[in-house]
Amino acid sequence: MNSIVLYFYNLFAIFLPETKFFRLKCLILKQAGVVIGSNVRICSSVRIIGDGRLSIGDNCWIGSQTLIISSFPAIVKLGNNVDIAPKVYIGTGSHEIDMIRDHSAGKGISLDVLIDDGVWVCTGALLLPGVIIGKKSIIAAGSIVTKNVPKYSLAVGSPSKIVKEYNTINNSIS
């Protein structure tokens, strides 16, 4: 992504109504190098930062005050029909632990975050670098996802744990 275009997008978007002008916001983000599908709705207070990559599938919603940080060479990839609630954090960057030098945060690392089709990420969730969220899974409000979440699952807590798995045949809980 072009971090300069993103900088101006983030400045400009705050002056737009939160849930209006979705096409305009997507058009500007495409100019920054974001890959965006059709019928994508991004609230104006969403912040997208970094020089990594971002791909958003069709029919996605990204709620207010969400922060997406993608650092090179990683990608944040949202499948189709993904719903991101307000105040969610999605980030690709972290550090190796370094107990030898002055700073415990050692060499920077950048790992992909992949969110499959139909996922619902609830308010205040944190998706840390390197996680894969399986198809039609739900990340509960306030959860911190540090490990992969299998498809058709409900992940809850800090760190998140799988508490339910859904049977896709009759939409019931296993």
Image (cartoon, rainbow, N blue to C red):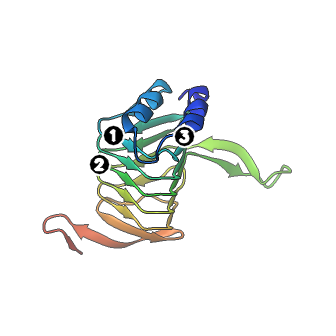
Picture disc at residue 71: none
The residue depicted at 50 percent of the width and 62 percent of the height is 125
Picture disc at residue 15: 3
Picture disc at residue 57: 1
Front position among marks 3 and 2: 3
Identify whether 42 is placed above or below 8.
below
Front position among marks 3 and 1: 3
Report whether residue 50 is seen.
Answer: no
- Residue 155 is situated, as x and y percent measured from the top left of the image, at 41, 67
Assign the C terminus to one quadrant of the image: bottom left
**169 or 9: nearer the viewer:** 9
Number of residues whose C-alpha sits closer than 10 Å to that of mark 3, classed few (under 14), some (14–19) or many (20 or more): few
The residue depicted at 55 percent of the width and 42 percent of the height is 14
- Label whose residue precedes the other's in the sequence (3 or 2): 3
Q: Secondary structure at mark 2?
A: loop
Q: Secondary structure at mark 3?
A: loop
- Residue 84 is situated, as x and y percent measured from the top left of the image, at 41, 54
